[in-house]
């Protein structure tokens, strides 16, 4: 399996600062559930976002797929991307170093997708 990274950004830059519309909230919630499902399947290795709320805010998802075509499908099937709430860029990627410490220790797996 190859590793990939996709970077996502809100299509409405003020979304994080001004709050989500009902449609955006539904898409972001579905996005979070989608990623949780991919984590459970062993596809997603890590996902998170910057803690800024300006036009520079972004999220990244590091995941595995058999091919770039399969990786493209992962990105295209992300509900936030599919619904136009987020725009995404896909990159071939390779983790070079991984800490033996669990970086999520003390962080709830039920964290909010927009916290």
Image (cartoon, rainbow, N blue to C red):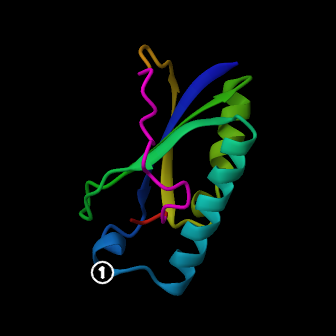
Task: Please tell me which residue lies in front, 97 or 2.
Answer: 97
Q: Position of residue 87 (x, y in %)?
A: 48, 55
Q: Position of residue 43 (x, y in %)?
A: 69, 35
Q: Residues within 10 Å of mark 1 (few under 14, many from 20)?
A: few
Label count reads 1
Q: Quadrant of residue 26?
A: bottom right
Q: What residue is pinned by disc 1?
A: 18
Instruction: Identify the residue shown where x is 47% and y is 19%.
Output: 95
Asked whether, in this view, residue 104 is left or right of residue 109, the answer is left
**Which residues are drawn in magenta?**
99-112
Residue 2, compared with residue 55, is above or below; it is above
Q: Residue furthest top?
A: 96
Q: Position of residue 16 (x, y in %)?
A: 34, 70
Task: Please tell me which residue lies in front, 87 or 15.
Answer: 15
Q: Is residue 104 magenta?
A: yes
From the image, which quarter does the C terminus lie in? Answer: bottom left
Task: Please tell me which residue lies in front, 73 or 51.
Answer: 51
Task: Please tell me which residue lies in front, 49 or 82.
Answer: 49
Q: Residue furthest bottom?
A: 22
Q: Position of residue 18 (x, y in %)?
A: 30, 80
Residue 100, compared with residue 36, is above or below; it is above
Asked whether, in this view, residue 53 is left or right of residue 61, the answer is left
Q: Residue furthest front?
A: 106
């Amino acid at each position: 399996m190859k590793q990939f990274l996709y970077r996502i950004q809100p299509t409405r830059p003020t979304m994080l600062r001004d709050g989500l519309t009902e449609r955006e909230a539904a898409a972001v919630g579905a996005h979070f559930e989608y990623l949780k499902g991919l984590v459970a399947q062993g596809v997603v290795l890590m996902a998170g976002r910057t803690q800024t709320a300006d036009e520079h805010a972004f999220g990244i998802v590091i995941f595995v797929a058999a091919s770039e075509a399969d990786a493209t499908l992962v990105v295209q099937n992300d509900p936030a991307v599919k619904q136009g709430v987020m725009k995404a860029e896909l990159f071939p990627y390779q983790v070079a170093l991984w800490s033996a410490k669990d970086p999520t220790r003390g962080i709830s797996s039920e964290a909010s997708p927009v916290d």
